Image (cartoon, rainbow, N blue to C red):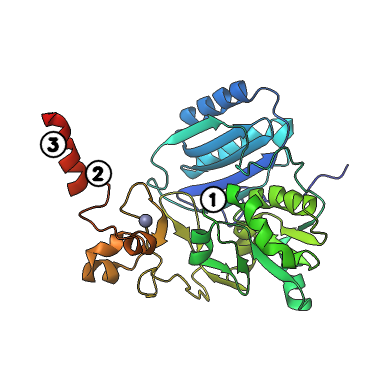
Amino acid sequence: MPARRTRAITGARMPRGFPVILFYKYIAIAAPESFAAAQRALCVELALKGRILIAAEGVNGTLAGPRDAIERYVAALRSDERFADLEVKTSAGDAGTFTKLVVKVRPEIVTLGAGPLMPDFHNHLRAAEWKQTLETDPDVVLLDVRNRYESAAGKFAGAIACDIEHFRELPAYLEKLETLKERKVLMYCTGGIRCEKASALFRQRGFTNVFQLHGGIASYQEEFGNEHWLGELFVFDQRMTTRVEEALVPIGQCAHTGRETNRFVNCLHDPCHVLFLLAEETERENPETRLCPDCLAAGWNSATADYKGSPARVAKGVQASHS
Ligand SMILES: [Zn+2]
């Protein structure tokens, strides 16, 4: 069997100071707990921070650390024959990109909750094939299977964004995409991990012509930057987004005022806590905009909302202490 092409971790694109790596692999892990313990020990030894999710179906990780520690980690993981061909995406971070290390065993490495699905390996398009398809086939439908706040910060030009808050909402959301069943669908996500499951789910539901972007947006942007891409790439760490400066077309808009912004906040009302874009000027003009548009529309305000230190919660606390 020919060796699969993998991107060298020591390539020119590897950021010098404090790289952040993103990787996953669907592969049977016979003893997830002991594998997790070994991974935790390795990360602690190398002083890496980030998040690794481990399941019987594989591994999903993102880590940050000094370059030499990251290189040692990747070398160690690839020395395990199950991960010899592991593909790793890198971006630039700093010591604050992750505040801690979390290594967890989960039922799935990315939660879809659609029952056992054999990830699709046959319909991947490499970045160059993806780009070429976009440029030569006017009938393709681009589908962003990430969450709504991710596509609000950036997406492929012309892509349909799924209106979901969590990946696990995708199976129900599929009913709204029935009209795409006969179309040639090109789906993408951040690093490719979600598409492998989503593609299998779509096929199971009768979509016959689905392709997925191998390595996701992260791999595509390593090669083609902002070509066909608008805005920034949402990432699940303290950076919130990453971007390619050259030819950047910002698309992030304040959820309240439509002002251009890439600033994410969580809704002040803890039971909601939804992530949304809020321009700094908007918040300065009206601090009530720390509540998301839905919560404001529902009649919440900063006096009635439930959050740490809120008047409502403080009042409840006082009441409790007197009862
Ligand atoms: Zn809210």
Q: From this viewpoint, is residue 6 visible?
A: no
- Compared across the picture, whether 182 is left or right of 144 comes to right
| Amino acid at the residue labelled 1 | His
**Compared to 170, does 36 lie above or below?**
above
Q: Is mark 1 within 8 Å of ligand 1?
A: no
Residue 155: x percent and y percent?
57, 67
Helix, strand or loop at mark 3: helix
Residue 42: x percent and y percent?
53, 28
Alpha carbon of mark 3 to alpha carbon of mark 2: how far? 14 Å
Task: Classify the position of ligand 1 by quadrant: top left, top right, bottom left or bottom right.
Answer: bottom left
Which residue lies at the image location 57% right of the left edge and 41% below the top edge?
61
Nearer the N terminus, badge 3 or badge 2?
A: 2
In the picture, the quarter occupied by the N terminus is top right
Alpha carbon of mark 2 to alpha carbon of mark 1: how far? 24 Å
Nearest-to-viewer mark from 3 and 2: 3
In the rendered image, which residue does mark 2 sit on?
308
Nearer the N terminus, badge 1 or badge 3?
A: 1
In the rendered image, which residue does mark 3 sit on?
318
Helix, strand or loop at mark 1: loop
**Compared to 271, does 227 lie above or below?**
below
Which residue lies at the image location 57% right of the left edge and 36% below the top edge?
53
